[in-house]
Image: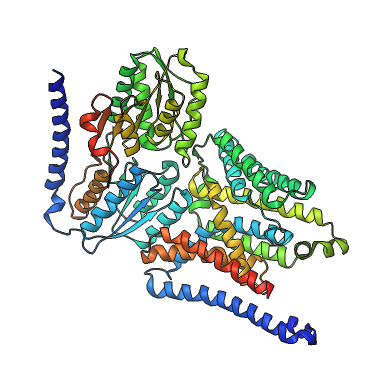
Amino acid sequence: MTAVEHAPATSRGWFNSKVFAKLAIRLGAFAAFAGIMIYFALTARGFTTTYNMINVVEQSTILGFLAFAMTVVFIGTGTDVQKGGIDLSIAANAGLCAAVYAVMMREGYGNYVAIPAAIGTGMVIGFFNGLAVVTLKIMPLLGTLAVMNIAAGVELTLTENTVVPVQSDLMTVLAFGRFLGISTLAWCLIIGSVLLVWAIHYSKIGLRLYAVGGHIEAARAAGINTGRYVYGAYIFSGFMAGVASILIVSRLSSSTPGTGLMLLPILAAALLGTVFSRRFIPTIGGTLLAALFIGFLANGFQLLGISSYWVSGVQGALILLVVTVTSFAKKH
Amino acid sequence: MHQKTKISRRSTVKAIALATTMLAVSFPAMAQDKPLEGKTVGVTVIGTDHHWDLMAYRGQVDRLKELGAEVIALDAGRNDQTQISQIQTLIAQKPDAILEQLGNLDVLNPWLQRIRQADIPLFTVDTSTPHAINNTTSNNYSIGAELALQMVNDMGGKGKVAVFNGFYSVPVCKIRYDQLKYVLQSFPEIEIIEPELRDVIPNTVQQAYSDVTDILTQYGEDSDLKSVWACWDVPMIGATQAIEAAGRKDVMTYGVDGSPEYVEMVATEGSPAGAVAAQQPYEIGKRAADNVAAYLAGEEVPPFTFVPAVLITKENAAETAEDFLPKKD
């Protein structure tokens, strides 16, 4: 609303149609989400039960955490696919962290050593991304792709592509524990989201990060050490990969090959999330909604007895739709 | 003499097939036309990207539908996290029974336990777990031993063997591998090359091709390398191609499952594919569905149902391979 009031009078007509288009898309996105939810609620048996709802939140936690990481990278580097940043290594990084954690637990180090080691590994990989993108000025698509391969390679070396089982009380609590009727994983998503919304949208660091990603020259002129923020975004992304890896291991009771496959759903959630924001920018809340949306979609399909083969197809179609609509809205 | 053995082999195969059919026909669940009418059954599989997996999956789904059940069929596309989420939602759907096929037991066991805690009868296909009422499978103990003995025979009781062992966490592979090791205990002149090779999913064939090419370079014609073994046959497709490409005549491959491409290789004169223990995955899937019907009809179901497998070798391929070759439309 404030944006409209401050708009220069000469371009009011053009601005209004642009604002209108954006508003329509955003409302359309919310309406589509709500519509699909209502449809599932009316037709899918058991969809609206509290138990099922909490299940979906729980199932979305790992995707949510990794999509948050991608969102932070988008915020700090801009969403333009060619000029902006991206962290293609995130899923492989989570796989590597899970492997580090599982292998260290197998070798007899306790949680107190293995968890920091896993998260530390994630941050080191994040640092490599920063090194490639900021210091060596490699295109993020290529730089993080290379780092993705490094992470995947080290994971294979550690696990020899096998399943490494982990048993610990902490894992049982994370995977099957409940507090106030809500499962531990669901709590993780709730608390993680609240903390991140505060850090990204209300803290000084978060606002500066937006400045860096929104207009890097302006941010630099304003005296922000932009390189440090981009580095920070990538290292944070690695940190989140480490945290998510602990949740992955707890859910699967082991580290398994194939965590890298999560990259596409992560990108889908982070990109889809932009539709839920006022200016089509990446936000934590938007990404949270998108991750839940993807979770509800798979859940609703299963409850309706629609083949699971459709889920990924629909996911792909959604990404295409979102990217088309938002880029169209940004240009016009 | 030769003719006689041929006939006796063929009749053995026929007898097994006949026995299987009779068993299926005489199965009590058949008494009623659609014994699963009004019942919902969940089927969860880790993936269907290989011939065996797809056939067993289809066998279950087709048979369950034939018996009148409403089927919730879930293919996790080789993604453990997806399978866990699907199982979690499936539990909330409270079906009358759940069928689970393959996957990593370390990952699955806590969740299979939760299925039982929710009082949903659990049946498995090719997955041995204490939480299942019945596991329908091939007799992997005999498959593993028979294939190992065939390999030992072809090797003349001595030499080196390269072994793929990437899926020891998959129960059926563990059994077959352990059986191989057990058989080899009696043949001290046969040596498994260390380190063992790792078969992978996906890119199974390509990876096996390059791994075996490396092994062939490392172990030349005079090295006494005679065999390559895996607990299934998809990597053996790549291994066989690699041996052919290297022009080696001294190395043979051995696998399990009966993927049409590999059976064709075994049946081909001069191909380095030595033998394959061919299973009947579609039949296994159907029998698992029959077990669900029997159990829900209140009948006793044994903990294991074995569906016979056929050892196809270079010598007997002419009689045994036919049913397992690629279907030509």
Q: Tell me which residue sits at (22%, 32%) in the image.
A: B320
Q: Tell me the quarter of the image containing the N terminus of chain B.
A: top left
Position above or below: B252 against A212 = above
Residue A15 locus on image (x, y percent) = 72, 82
Q: Is residue A45 visible?
A: yes
Q: Nearer the viewer, residue B33 or A58?
A: B33
Residue A85 lies left or right of residue B154; in this view the side is right
Percent from the top left, x then y, of residue A44? 38, 70
Q: Is residue B77 left or right of residue B301?
A: right
Residue B137: image quadrant is top left
Q: Position of residue A278 (x, y in %)?
A: 66, 75
- Residue A101 at what x, y percent from top left? 59, 41
Q: Residue at x 34, y 34 (%)?
A: B262
Placement of B241 over or under B158, stated as above or below: below
User: Depth check: B76 or A195 in front?
Assistant: B76
Q: Is residue A179 visible?
A: no
Q: Residue drawn 78% across and 62% down?
A: A212
